[in-house]
């Protein structure tokens, strides 16, 4: 089996542009057109640009809550207000600057441009982790990179809908049957970042292999591969995060299961997450004892 990835360069996308048309044109130049069975991977940022999900910070008026948070974190109160406006619930604060000050994150391990890294941290010393539209985001998914100064983009809440629309439009333009995955970059506990699927259409999101037998005929505790997320991560190798200028990738040759389900069908709700955390703590105390909890709290 061979899987091929083709990076698609697009012209600067503006609100109102026919994004599907731009993708089809780029695919013709870079990959011989879109073919049946392709997976078209698109960044959420280019969706935000095409559909006008852009915010100008100089038009944002901070609330008292935003001003209080900004005073404690050193962040821009207008940015914090925009995070609050686009969140269903603030879950916790990630103290990135504190972890650097304590030596838990060594800058030379994550940056070749130390001066630029400290400048970025100065602007965003803390990150708000929020629940938004049934998914977990850092800073509500707001993104100022590759935008003019003072402009930030926000991804739509239900990107499955946009994946379905792009897929439908591609079929209309080309007659080809392709799946669509919309991605976003997020922090991860490896002290780096990963690309995750935020929306999809036409592809099975999770492989339903739990309990399938292994090579020795034993039922497997696993096999529930996050297909859409794995495709997102593979595509990020071409997309990059800075000035690569590749907001879309064609994945060709991967034999996937076609499906009308979307990413939102599999993301855990806030209630489920809270219940899971409570049960993890209860089960750990019951099985490992209260000393486990004391170690967690003290260490």
Image: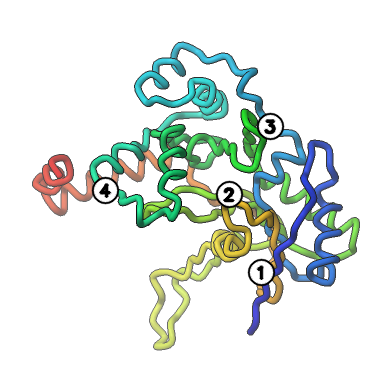
Q: Image quarter for residue 202? A: bottom right
> What residue do we see at 27% from left, 40% from top?
101
Q: Nearer the viewer, mark 1 or mark 4?
A: 4
Distance from label 2 to label 3 (Cα)? 16 Å
Is 113 in front, or is 84?
A: 113
Precedes in sequence: disc 1 or disc 3:
3
Precedes in sequence: disc 2 or disc 1:
2
Residue bearing mark 3: 54
Precedes in sequence: disc 2 or disc 3:
3
Distance from label 1 to label 3 (Cα)? 34 Å
Q: Nearer the viewer, mark 2 or mark 3?
A: 3
Q: What SS does tag 4 mark? A: loop
Precedes in sequence: disc 4 or disc 2:
4
> What residue do we see at 46% from left, 44% from top?
116
Residue 10 position, x and y percent, is: 77, 53
Residue bearing mark 2: 184
Q: Residue furthest top?
A: 64
Q: Are marks 3 and 4 in contact (CB under 8 Å)?
A: no
Q: Nearer the viewer, mark 4 or mark 2?
A: 4
Residue bearing mark 4: 104
């Amino acid at each position: 089996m061979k899987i091929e990835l083709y990076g698609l360069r697009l012209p600067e996308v503006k609100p109102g542009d026919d994004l599907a048309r731009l993708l089809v044109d780029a695919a013709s130049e870079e990959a011989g057109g879109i073919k049946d069975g392709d997976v078209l991977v698109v960044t959420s940022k280019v969706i935000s640009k095409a559909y006008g999900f852009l915010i100008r910070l100089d038009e944002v008026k901070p609330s008292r809550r935003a001003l209080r948070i900004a005073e404690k974190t050193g962040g821009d109160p207008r940015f914090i207000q925009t995070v609050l406006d686009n969140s269903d619930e603030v879950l916790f604060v990630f103290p990135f600057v504190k972890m650097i000050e304590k030596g838990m994150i060594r800058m030379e391990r994550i940056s070749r441009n130390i001066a630029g890294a400290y400048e970025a941290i100065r602007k965003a010393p803390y990150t708000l982790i929020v629940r938004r539209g049934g998914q977990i985001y850092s800073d509500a998914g707001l993104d100022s990179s590759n935008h003019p100064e003072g402009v930030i983009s926000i991804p739509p809440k239900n990107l499955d809908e946009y994946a379905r629309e792009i897929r439908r439009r591609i079929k209309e333009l080309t007659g080809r049957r392709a799946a669509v995955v919309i991605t976003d970059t997020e922090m991860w506990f490896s002290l780096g970042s990963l690309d995750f699927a935020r929306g999809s259409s036409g592809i099975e999101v999770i492989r339903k292999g739990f309990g399938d037998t292994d090579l020795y005929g034993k039922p497997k505790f696993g096999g529930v591969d996050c297909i859409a997320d794995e495709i997102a991560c593979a595509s990020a190798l071409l997309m990059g995060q800075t000035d690569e200028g590749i907001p879309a990738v064609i994945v060709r040759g991967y034999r996937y299961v076609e499906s009308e389900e979307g990413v939102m069908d599999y993301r855990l709700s806030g209630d489920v997450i809270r219940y899971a955390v409570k049960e993890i703590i209860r089960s750990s105390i019951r099985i490992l004892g209260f000393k486990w909890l004391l170690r967690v709290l003290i260490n």
